[in-house]
Amino acid sequence: MRLTNRLCAQHIGWHFKKHWLVQGKRVPRETGAAAELLRLAVPVRTPEDLLKPKVERRMLDFIGTGQRPIAEANAYSNSVSAACHSYDDNSLLIGGLAQAQVLTNTIEVKTYPPKIEEAIANQKLPNGIDRNIRNALLSAHVLDAEQVKLPKIKLIERPAFNLPRSYGISHERVNRLLVNKILYEIEKLAGHSLTVRRKLLDNASFRTSLCKDSDQIGFAINANKLVCSNRAIDEVKLKFNGNLPDLYPMKCTISIPKKHVVNSGNFYPFRTEATCSHPHTVFSFFDTNLVNTHGSEVTTSQFHARTMLKAFVVAVARAKHLHGPSADGDLLKPIVVQSVQTDGRTFHFGVFQLNTLNISSQNTLKNYWFHRESYELFSKCGQEAGRPHLENYNGDIFRILNAFYCSS
């Protein structure tokens, strides 16, 4: 029905609208009060003068005492003498594990320490543990109620093509739910006598720096979940011999950019006298579906290198926390840190033993990195015909995690 004046006349809203329109145009009548106040020498002010008073600013001119603004290019010139290589959570070594070995002066051992190998082979688990882990998988990947806009997915062959944005559970929440549920099942099996000697910490930050053949390297990482213990993990007393990979003509710091770092000191998130201050296991999350900074997919070797460097930074920060920030030599008692990295489906386990803080190529004493190849927790996890579906569940991952948690 077309809106006409006759139709609007029957609507009471039209009356009020016209009434307010007329009342809004009314002009206040002059009562003579302002003139009477002015005759009596009383100042008259408008409401705007009271609500928004005008403030007169005095201009001060100092000669020779004002501090000159620092240019943006030289903003950090007073804090550091020169830029140093900076490695953080967003960095990725283009050379993969070989570059990480040369960078940290580490020998690769393609097996776990003997104690962990023995624990994996001899452990006996209840029959219902696999069912609980399957439920934890479906709960983290499918059944959680969070629905957020997921990050953009880029195609390497078509970098300018925009794929439709999808909604679902965020990568951070999937990994955190999965790791928390697996640790809960491990703690139930371990019992109170062992869990009382472990502490869990979320989003622990570590910062340290080392010198590598006249190059200063700063490390700043974040452990998504850290397991601490009241005593340090025993060192592996076996001797391993090996040569570092040859990266010629590439340098070990080729993919670590230089940045001006204001605070390049050592930071460890615990006090020395704390009860559970020893690092035990580092859990880190990583999305391998994203394209790295070099415009290519993340390789398996780069994924493994990231696992090793996480444990290396935590071990170095702990060593300098105990022996002082200026310590740079061989350690009388090596520091052992376990590292676990996952993207929600792929798991990589490793154990790093820090024998020396001197990572120069001239040092004959090497650090040790024990690890195997990555494990796939499942091949497919999602919904089929409106029901949760899981294919090819791998129970070996829980057994390895259980052995890592119980190691001491």
Image (cartoon, rainbow, N blue to C red):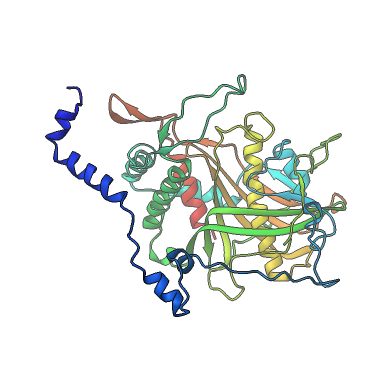
Q: Is residue 284 left or right of residue 239?
A: left
x, y (%) of residue 381? Answer: 39, 31
Residue 2 visible in image: yes
Quadrant, the N terminus: top left
Residue 241 visible in image: no
Relative to the observer, which residue lies in front, 67 or 199? Answer: 67
x, y (%) of residue 87? Answer: 70, 49
Q: Quadrant of residue 178?
A: top left
x, y (%) of residue 31? Answer: 33, 66
Q: Tell which residue pokes out farthest to the top in this image.
A: 157
Instruction: Classify 195 as above or below 15.
Output: below
Q: In the image, what residue occupies the spot 76% across and 44% down?
A: 257
Q: Tell which residue pokes out farthest to the bottom in this image.
A: 40
Relative to the observer, which residue lies in front, 119 or 391? Answer: 391
Quadrant, the C terminus: bottom right
Relative to the observer, which residue lies in front, 68 or 171? Answer: 68
x, y (%) of residue 204? Answer: 56, 59
Q: Is residue 300 left or right of residue 128?
A: right
Question: How many numbered dots are placed on residues in this image?
Answer: 0
Q: Quadrant of residue 13?
A: top left
Q: Is residue 48 left or right of residue 128?
A: right
Instruction: Classify 105 as above or below 270.
Output: above
Instruction: Classify 266 as above or below 147.
Output: below
Instruction: Classify 98 as above or below 30.
Output: above
Q: In the image, what residue occupies the spot 27% across and 45% down?
A: 21
